[in-house]
Amino acid sequence: MRTYGDPANPPILFLHGIRLGGGIFEPHARALAAEFFVVTPDLPGHGALENLRFDAPTIDAFFTYIADDVVRRPPVIVGYSLGGYIAMRYAADRPSHSSGLVLTGCTTDIVGYRRALYNAAVRMSAPIPQPLFQRALSAFFHLTLPREIAGVVIPFRFNHDVFEQSLQLVGDVRYGELLRAYAKPVLIVNGRWDLLFRRDEAAYARAARARVAVIPGADHVAPLRAPDTFCELVATFARKVFSQEFPSREGDSSAWQSSPGA
């Protein structure tokens, strides 16, 4: 569990995507640590917690530990990709345990044909030995990502068990609809070319009465391609949340219409 900054400062919790770890957010955490208390854990089934199951009871226990033993007040939760779905699930189940959400690379519902494609990918990857699959992923990242970003993501180990277990949590759930009952501020930040995970962006924004920021020239790895822009969006949002500048969504929904910026 990595933490940065003074624990007395307003907390921000970063949740990474599948096959990654909290370490991808070290530059972001260091940039924000002068103003916020930043927590960048590995999710269950990943990194230091790779021996844990990626299932609902384990994730609930993970969040309980963070809420009870790490942060002093409800954090702004920044959820990236799979971490975003977990953030939405947790925020919907325990809205008093977060102060707001920043969602990136996770505004599409894995339902219908999308779930079928996800399930097919899980089945097809199952027979492939994990070292071979890891090498194939490494080659793919070398081809598709800038060298410095590939160097960040490649060292993390692929865990097929997590791949399979994640489908049980994100599949067949309309996460956008869960946000309707979440009365805290929500910011959606996506890369312009993250076409797969922006499919339901507008619906999510309407449901959550969220603000939307789109990072030009970025894709699904927008937080890594544009860390300075991403950090500034998170910091601006968190400042407003913790200063109570945002109105309650229950009290003034007009202030929560979607907008192109933060």
Image (spheres, rainbow, N blue to C red):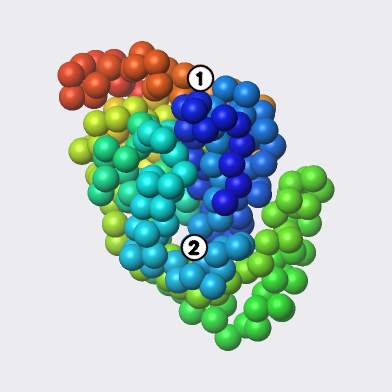
In 3D space, how far apart are the residues under numbered discs 2 and 1 (Cα atoms)? Answer: 29 Å
State left or right for residue 42 relative to residue 175: right
180 or 216, which is in the foreground? 180
Which amino acid type is marked by label 1?
Thr
Determine the residue positioned at 33% across, 49% down. 90
Pinpoint residue 72: horizontal percent, then vertical percent.
Answer: 41, 35
Please state which amino acid type lies under the numbered disc 2: Pro
Nearest to the observer: residue 21 or residue 110 = 21
**Mark 2 falls on what kind of element?**
loop
Which residue bears the numbered disc 1? 236
Residue 179 showing in the rendered view: no
Q: Residue at x 60, y 63 (%)?
A: 48
Give residue 44's mark: 2
Q: Quadrant of residue 55?
A: bottom left
Disc 1, SS: helix
The furthest residue to the left: 251
